[in-house]
Amino acid sequence: MKKLNKFNQLKLSIYEDKRIIIENYQELIDITEEQITVDYYTIVGTFLKITTMDDYFMEIKGTVRQIIINE
């Protein structure tokens, strides 16, 4: 996995309507309906899906149970 430089800080925002926005990500590592791993975040839940994605922005919808920060 590439290291984030100081100008591209990874940002994760959680919204009430079962939506997560991740900005400035480097790598989508794994995706299933129950788990999505992006850089050092692992999002665990049910019915997870990526609804919008480009080179630096990702929107995830579904029921989130836990967000794990991997070191």
Image: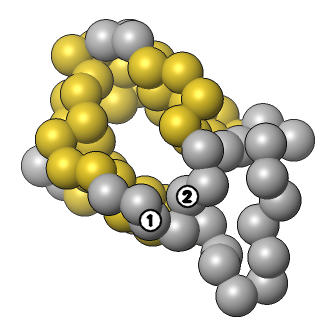
Q: Earlier in the sequence, mark 2 or mark 1?
A: 2
**Which residue corresponds to the image point at 54% horizontal and 21% vertical from the top-left?**
30
- Residue 17 at x, y percent in the picture: 12, 49
Which residue bears the numbered disc 1? 56
- Residue 60 at x, y percent in the picture: 28, 42
Residue 64 appears left or right of 61: right
CB-based contact (under 8 Å), mark 2 and mark 1: yes
**Which residue corresponds to the image point at 79% horizontal and 53% vertical from the top-left?**
2
The circle drawn on residue 17 is: none
Which residue bears the numbered disc 2? 25
**Which residue corresponds to the image point at 25% horizontal and 36% vertical from the top-left?**
50
Tally of numbered tags = 2
Q: Secondary structure at mark 2?
A: loop
Q: CA distance from mark 2 to mark 1?
A: 6 Å
Residue type at mark 1: give it.
Tyr
Looking at the image, what colour scheme do you see?
A: secondary structure
Crowd rating for badge 1 (residues with CA inside 10 Å; few <14, some 14–19, many 20+):
few
Q: Where 68 sits versus 1, above or below?
A: above
Kindly indicate the quadrant of the structure image that contains residue 62. top left
